[in-house]
Image: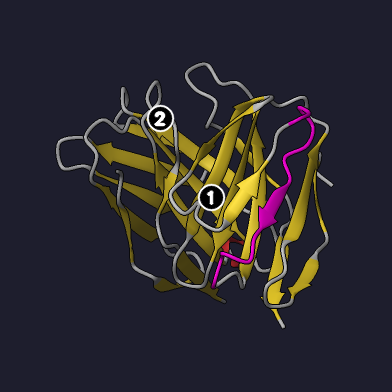
Amino acid sequence: DGGITQSPKYLFRKEGQNVTLSCEQNLNHDAMYWYRQDPGQGLRLIYYSQIVNDFQKGDIAEGYSVSREKKESFPLTVTSAQKNPTAFYLCASSIPGVYATNEKLFFGSGTQLSVL
Amino acid sequence: GENVEQHPSTLSVQEGDSAVIKCTYSDSASNYFPWYKQELGKRPQLIIDIRSNVGEKKDQRIAVTLNKTAKHFSLHITETQPEDSAVYFCAASENFGNEKLTFGTGTRLTIIP
């Protein structure tokens, strides 16, 4: 599936519950990203990681947490502090480019998170 | 931080005609500008990108132009086909800097047969 696997495809969260979205890649890419996609708002960066055991906040990190213990995996936890979590979440990875790590993004197929 | 504006939000074009999508950016330090295509129900895919050291790049029916002075860049699709129907996103980032891609809000392109 393009080397980047997101699971589950659909996820439902109850109020006050933390949920974790999985993202696994077998492309040997160093950098990985989480984006949130809302209708009419494009893609907004939540967190990104350029190397194992290191990650940086994106533009809308509040209410989310990540870990990068392995090169292949970059799970995203949507915490109860995220008051409007309903969205389509996209994970991506990128090969080290000639210039930077954010070129040539490869996206997963996404997870649709909804609140019950 | 960077702010990317994209216009129009929707665009309908007769098959065979050309389509143009425009984006402006705010951070003069941005120097990398990719375009992604997202077909309905599918993941975004990179279709073309340009760096600030060139003004134009072409790949078959797709071309991107960049005006650094005016801080805007455009996607041009010629001889449009039904399979060009999708949502297109522009993006900008500062390489060698924070390297965070900022995306535009997307353009839904519909090709009318």
Crowding around mark 1 (Cα neighbors within 10 Å: few <14, some 14 to 19, many 20+) is many
Q: Residue at x 44, y 37 (%)?
A: B100
The one of B12 and B33 positioned closer to us in this rendering:
B33
Chain designation of label 2: B
Please name the amino acid that badge 2 sits on.
Answer: Asn
| Spot occupied by residue A82 in the image (x, y as percentages of width and height) | 56, 65
In the displayed structure, would residue B16 be above or below residue A65? below
Residue A82 colored in magenta in the image: yes
Q: Quadrant of residue B29 in the image? A: top left
Determine the main secondary structure of the stretch shown in magenta: loop
The one of A62 and B62 positioned closer to us in this rendering:
A62
Farthest residue to the front: give it: A16
Tell me the SS state at disc 2. loop
**Residue A46 image label:** 1
Q: Residue at x 49, y 64 (%)?
A: B16
Farthest residue to the bottom: give it: A116
Q: Which residues are magenta?
A: A69-83
In the displayed structure, would residue B39 be above or below residue A91? below
Question: CB of mark 1 within 8 Å of CB of mark 2?
Answer: no
Q: Quadrant of residue A74 in the image? A: top right
Please name the amino acid that badge 1 sits on.
Answer: Ile
| Spot occupied by residue A6 in the image (x, y as percentages of width and height) | 79, 52
Q: Is residue B96 visible?
A: yes
Query: For mark 2, what is the residue?
Result: B98
Instruction: Measure how far apart labels 1 and 2 are at the Cα level.
Output: 14 Å
